[in-house]
């Protein structure tokens, strides 16, 4: 009974891990990797969900450097300032005009030098969470050595000075510059059926193209272009994986005939499962070379699922998966099947082997009977010895009472 309970607990933990893994990522929080702003100004720290979805019912938490107290918190459909860092009191605002589209930048007003640092944007829904980081730097503006407005006795209104600053920034950002070739595209997966590609440091504004292993274009499900403080562009795009492609390529190009591309394997059918017996009652199955992460199912000769006693999934140097599983042999089955599968976009690749189990013979039954009888004899001997000790203890107690 205890052994069966132990097997059940192990199986439950494995199934729970697989269940949590099936709740794969549904979105990614995207933000500009770095932001620079001047002392005393206001800044927007951009953040959005990809693919586009509503963030109205999610928890949105900006913090640095600790989760709590936080910079700003939006939860249960409203802002919560109860544990806000004192230095940000009355200076933050989460802009919600486009929150139903998954866009919710954070406004920080009247910047101080202490506001510099790494910021984290953490977003959590009922079944998933994701986080992005922003390196934020507050700089001190450099002023030319001319007589100040204070010295001349003339005070310039703040809104006029801000407009002048914005105009000068616009003139600087609109000034002609040579083309800039961005970083190599980085392809990442956040779910079994969704792939992201991002690249930054481009000028002029780039465009991104997805192609499958046959050179056919794949339409993106989401695409965003950002401009950083240096007026360089960052592009982020996502696709739902084509049902038959094994490789995907992301190419980022500019109008100056400059381009960079990256490719990634998105599917691989692994080796046929190899079944081996380690002991008389334990069987192992393993298979490698799979992508994405596979799942393994044991069945008996009647097609009933067998809960594994152990299962482990690992990733090799090529980012391909290997799965190893073990079961205790059911006494009544004559054949065991191990099936390893990987599902993407409702397509399924499988490979299986069958092992014939040695049927239970009269000799096996006789051996088990001998073992059972031996265990029973040992238990009876222990019980007899305990009864003898109790009897002796009672006699000693009576002798002591008689002497008294």
Image (cartoon, rainbow, N blue to C red):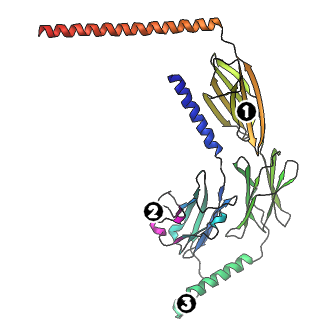
Which x, y percent locates residue 343? 74, 41
Callout 3 secondary element: helix
Membership of 85 in magenta stretch: yes
Q: Nearer the viewer, mark 1 or mark 2?
A: 1
Residue under numbered circle 1 = 340
Q: Residue at x 58, y 59 (%)?
A: 58
Q: Quadrant of residue 55?
A: bottom right
Membership of 266 in magenta stretch: no
State which quarter of the image contains the C terminus. top left
In this rendering, does residue 103 appear at all?
no
Q: Which class describes the residues within 10 Å of circle 1: few (<14), some (14-19), or many (20+)?
A: many
Image side of residue 224 versus residue 10, left or right: right
Callout 2 secondary element: loop
In this rendering, does residue 57 appear at all?
yes
Callout 1 secondary element: strand
N-terminal-most mark, 3 or 1? 3
Q: Which residues are magenta?
A: 63-92
Q: Residue furthest front?
A: 302
Residue under numbered circle 3 = 149
Which x, y percent locates residue 76? 53, 61
Q: Which mark is residue 64?
A: none
Q: CA distance from mark 3 to mark 1?
A: 76 Å
N-terminal-most mark, 1 or 2? 2
Cβ–Cβ under 8 Å for marks 3 and 1: no
Cβ–Cβ under 8 Å for marks 2 and 3: no
Residue under numbered circle 2 = 83
Q: Quadrant of residue 397?
A: top left
Which x, y percent locates residue 248? 80, 49
Cβ–Cβ under 8 Å for marks 1 and 2: no
Q: How many marks?
A: 3
């Amino acid at each position: 009974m205890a052994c069966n309970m132990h097997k059940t607990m192990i199986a439950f933990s494995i199934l729970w891990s697989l269940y949590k893994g099936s709740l794969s990522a549904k979105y990614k929080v995207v933000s500009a990797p770095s932001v620079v702003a001047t002392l005393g100004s206001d800044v927007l720290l951009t953040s959005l969900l990809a693919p586009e979805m509503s963030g109205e019912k999610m928890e949105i938490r900006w913090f640095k450097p600790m989760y709590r107290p936080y910079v700003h918190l939006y939860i249960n459909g409203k802002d919560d300032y109860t544990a806000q860092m004192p230095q940000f009191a009355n200076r933050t605002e989460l802009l919600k005009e486009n929150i139903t589209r998954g866009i919710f930048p954070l406004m920080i007003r009247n910047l101080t030098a202490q506001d510099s640092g790494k910021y984290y944007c953490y977003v959590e829904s009922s079944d998933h969470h994701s986080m992005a980081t922003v390196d934020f730097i507050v700089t001190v503006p450099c002023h030319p050595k001319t007589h100040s407005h204070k010295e001349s006795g003339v005070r310039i209104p703040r809104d006029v000075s801000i407009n002048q600053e914005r105009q000068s920034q616009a003139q600087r950002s609109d000034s002609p510059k040579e083309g800039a070739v961005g970083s190599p595209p980085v392809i990442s997966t956040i779910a079994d059926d969704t792939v992201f590609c991002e690249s930054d440091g481009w000028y002029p504004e780039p465009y991104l193209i997805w192609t499958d292993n046959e050179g056919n274009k794949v339409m993106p499900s989401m695409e965003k272009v950002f401009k950083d403080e240096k007026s360089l562009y960052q592009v982020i795009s996502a696709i739902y994986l084509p049902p038959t492609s094994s490789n995907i390529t992301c190419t980022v190009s500019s109008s100056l005939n400059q381009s960079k591309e990256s490719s990634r394997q998105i599917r691989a059918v692994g080796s046929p499962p190899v079944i081996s017996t380690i002991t008389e009652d334990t069987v192992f199955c393993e298979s490698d070379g799979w992508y994405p992460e596979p799942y393994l199912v044991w069945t008996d000769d009647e097609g009933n699922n067998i809960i594994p006693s152990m299962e482990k999934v690992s990733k090799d140097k090529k980012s391909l998966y290997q799965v190893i599983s073990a079961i205790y042999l059911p006494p009544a089955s004559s054949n065991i099947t191990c099936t390893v599968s990987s599902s993407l976009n409702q397509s399924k690749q499988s490979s299986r082997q069958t092992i014939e189990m040695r049927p239970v013979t009269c000799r096996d039954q006789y051996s088990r009977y001998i073992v059972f009888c031996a265990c029973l004899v040992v238990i009876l001997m222990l019980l007899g010895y305990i009864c003898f000790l109790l009897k002796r203890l009672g006699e000693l107690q009576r002798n002591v009472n008689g002497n008294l």
